[in-house]
Amino acid sequence: MHVRRITIIASVGTLARPQEIASGCTKPLIRKEWRTLSREARLDYISAIQCLQKLPARGTNDFPVISRFDDFVATHINQTGFVYTLPNNVTVQPPGIHENGVFLPWHRYFLALYEHALRSECGYTGAQPYWDWTLDTPSMNGSFVNSPIFDPITGFGGNGTIPDANSTFSCVSDGPFANRTLPLSRGIDHMISQPHCLRRNLAPFATDPGLSLQNVNRLLNHTKYWDFSIGMDNVDETAEVLGVHLAGHGGVGGEMGDMYTSPQDPLFYMHHANLDRLWWIWQRKKDGRVFEIGGPRSPRSDMGNTTLETVLEMYPFVGANVPAWRAMDLENSDGRGVLCNTYE
């Protein structure tokens, strides 16, 4: 099933906001680290995700989606961008949302829209939590595989297990998302419907030093936006040490290890909330950084540079398109943005 890539243009005056902000942001949602939440708060968050996974999808006209949760997955898959070959054999590479200048603001906005869906459609009263994986590295006397994030009762379930001798992947077999069937997969040049289990393959060797505090501090010491952004993938050009973005995805493995379909694992949002927190910290380190942006619009073709007016494309069943600048000030200090969050 081929899925068309659609672009939605909306006027700035009619854009839907992820939070109901009358004027400015006077009471931002406070995002907290997972293990600081009470047991009740953790269970409430998990329950809200399960609610979203049961609600009917709104994007069925464009994607092979089943649930409201899938709407967000499909948006990420299609916005990541497939390589297309036109009838005249010209290859087209959409700009995508990774390894380019919109990576950080696009995912910040996407995360806020997901958080808003949990709150407005599933009655969740908290904020999106984050997973500070530095606490689960040896340098902090932690253990990645024993992180409370993988607890089967108050967490997201643990590692995958191979269901039978004929299987080549590991299915999560405990926790709130065990035995869940995921509907989406990635074809060669388009999204496909391919039901499968939630897969994980924990790889702690990818997380140390990738997710270490030392690596985080090295990232935060960058002085330019683009160096900071691309530094989330690789520490340096040798790529001998993964940056925090890739190390988190690779450390969980399975679904999280696929750049396109990774939001099918709810841990995606926990991981990206922490990445967003690091960007928030970096922005606050020096005046003028809140609206600093740059880097190529596309990592593989000449489409110019990313600017404050570069559009963050979504779909109408997830959220309206906005220019990047409207999703860069997390606390919406001047009242012109679309966010209202902070981190603890």
Image (cartoon, grey):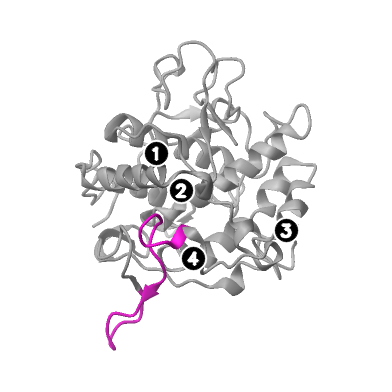
Mark 2 or 1 closer to N-term? Answer: 1
| Circle count | 4
Distance between the Cα atoms at labels 2 and 1?
Answer: 9 Å
Per the image, label 3 sits on a secondary structure element best described as helix
Per the image, label 2 sits on a secondary structure element best described as helix
Residue 96 in sight in this render: no
Q: Is residue 107 left or right of residue 255?
A: right
- Where residue 197 sits: x, y (%)? 28, 67
Residue identified by numbered label 3: 215
Per the image, label 1 sits on a secondary structure element best described as helix
Distance between the Cα atoms at labels 1 and 3?
Answer: 28 Å
Point 53% across, 51% down: residue: 131
Mark 1 or 3 closer to N-term? Answer: 1
Point 41% across, 70% down: residue: 159
Distance between the Cα atoms at labels 4 and 2?
Answer: 13 Å
Residue identified by numbered label 4: 252
Distance between the Cα atoms at labels 4 and 3?
Answer: 18 Å
Mark 4 or 2 closer to N-term? Answer: 4
Mark 2 or 3 closer to N-term? Answer: 3
Please state, as top left, top right, bottom left or bottom right, where the C terminus lies in the image: top right
Point 32% across, 67% down: residue: 174
